[in-house]
Amino acid sequence: MTPDPSTAAAWWRDAVIYQIYPRSFADANGDGVGDLPGVTARLEHVAALGVDAIWLSPFYRSPMADAGYDVADYREVDPVFGDLGDAERLVARAHDLGLRVLVDLVPNHTSDEHAWFRAALAASPLSPERERYVFRDGRGPRGEEPPNNWSSMFGGPAWTRVNEADHTPGQWYLHLFDSRQPDLNWQHPQVRAEFLDILRFWLDRGVDGFRVDVANALVKQEGLPDWDPIAALEKFGAEDAPVPPMWDQDEVHEIYRTWRDVVDSYDPAGSRILVAEAWVEPPTRLARYVRGDEMHQAFNFNYLGASWEADSLRQAVERSITANHAVGAPTTWVLSNHDVVRHATRFATARPGDHIGIGIGPRDPQPDATLGLRRARAASALMLALPGSAYLYQGEELGLPEHTTLPDEARQDPTWFRTDGGLVGRDGCRVPIPWHADAPAFGFNTTGATWLPQPPSYGELAADRQAGVAGSTLELYRAALRLRRELALGLGELTWDTTLGNERVVALRRTTPAGEILVLTNLGDQPVPVPKGMRVVLSTDDQLPAGPAVGADVTVWAIPDSRSPAGGPPT
Ligand code: GLC
């Protein structure tokens, strides 16, 4: 079943897209690191879940200083993941299963092992080789101070000083992330031309689009001025918040217009897409990335950052939809990815937004797994009932929690190293997936080797323990995705239902091509009744399935009693 060409152009507007983190999905060769043949072999699981597409985190040649987000060659597959033939077979198999494929593109920086950066280091200051990156002389009498005060996202300064050919300390280069991820200079025509060519390289191999890494960082403010992040925090998220000199510069948009021309040239109907990973606030500024001639989607981190409170969720939904509506773009929704604490853990902590990119470690207060899972199921069902497109992260369909007790010696995230262990970082959400409770490495491979250790709790959450089990998280996701399609929940309008008179319930009415659907998420501590005349077709409650009341931390979907559900009996 190849993707249906009749709906090709608009497929992404209400698509559910499943993120695969190849290092941790499935390991065919048993070396402890997941690979592309492993992904291909497990694609049936993803197709059976009922999603429309996959997004693959980077699998390109890389020294893995940032788990592959440090690319040494954009046109090669890293041997740890396989080879180009494996990538082509993966795309073909996905298409056979009716899944579209997005790949990750990392344009803000390369690896320090990229041929261009090696050439830059070997060349002298002011050479053309250095101009493709951001090299500057340091401040201070002997250039011993970094050129400005910017910090790396992973901790420490955003500048590293190099030794010149005569072995004396010389210029500094900019890296908004790890020192092994030098930022490219996007004012340079060669950089722009190279990425247009990389887009074509993967489009020629049949991919359906790109997730664009740190899409808001490519252009920096002229003169690279110092920046006061603490003062800016005061206005964080406000419409008049200052724009940082390293993020979200206006000039970045002209780059994406040229990219849009390339993807559209492959399919004028517009079925190949660009997705911005851009941590941009407020939503009105993020919406600028999805104007008609730029990208198709942008991840909605405003929603991901919302806390488990009715007001916070309502506000995030409202602000995102309004901002996207203004530019004619659908909104996206996401709760977990490879950079944040999994939502089954995040929602069991007091201040969930605090854990984005930072992690939870063994010395932190440990979350209540049962509460976290209950809320995660409710949050996912709310997300899947919202209009637009939703992103899932591998393992959330199993209800996987963060691994919060990883031993220090297992850690790999540069955040851990660059903060001298001050922040544990993102390893806890990147642990290999459990497929079989009773197999080595829970079925991740056959040897039992894993690049990060799995927590014992992953056994009972393994896919084979949940498949076919009523009320399991896996079956809940399958049911939700089937009903989402039948009830056309990704399309249509949303209005808030204020008739319940309970502020702690997120209550929304969806009007879709398939009719009216009531969605209730109870963030209070008391059960609330389902309004008369409505019949529950999906409930996240494993205690009170499809009952007349919505328990605490539960989401239900309900349709008018008189209506038969589009696709058979209620779940
Ligand atoms: C993005 C990626 C993250 C990576 C960073 C630098 O935020 O999602 O994993 O570390 O960019 O490439």
Image (cartoon, rainbow, N blue to C red):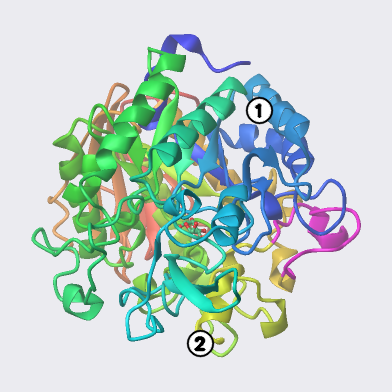
Would residue 85 be visible to someone looking at this image?
Answer: yes
Q: Quadrant of residue 64?
A: bottom right
Q: Residue furthest top?
A: 6
Q: Is mark 2 within 8 Å of ligand 1?
A: no
Residue wearing tag 1 = 91
Which quadrant would the N terminus be assigned to in this image?
top right
Q: Nearer the viewer, residue 406 or 559?
A: 406
Separation of residues labelled 1 and 2 (CA atoms): 40 Å
At horizontal 22% and vertical 57% (from top left) the residue drawn is 222
Residue 422, numbered circle = 2
- The answer to which of 319 and 386 lies nearer the viewer is 319
Q: Residue shown at 25%/59% (left/top)?
A: 505
Q: Is residue 438 magenta?
A: yes
Image check: 132 left or right of 141? right
Identified by mark 1, the residue type is Val
Q: In the displayed image of the protein, which residue is found farthest to the left?
A: 240
Chain part drawn in magenta: 432-454
Q: Position of residue 242 (x, y in %)?
A: 14, 64
Which element type, helix, strand or loop, lies under badge 2? loop
Magenta-drawn stretch, dominant element (helix, strand or loop): loop
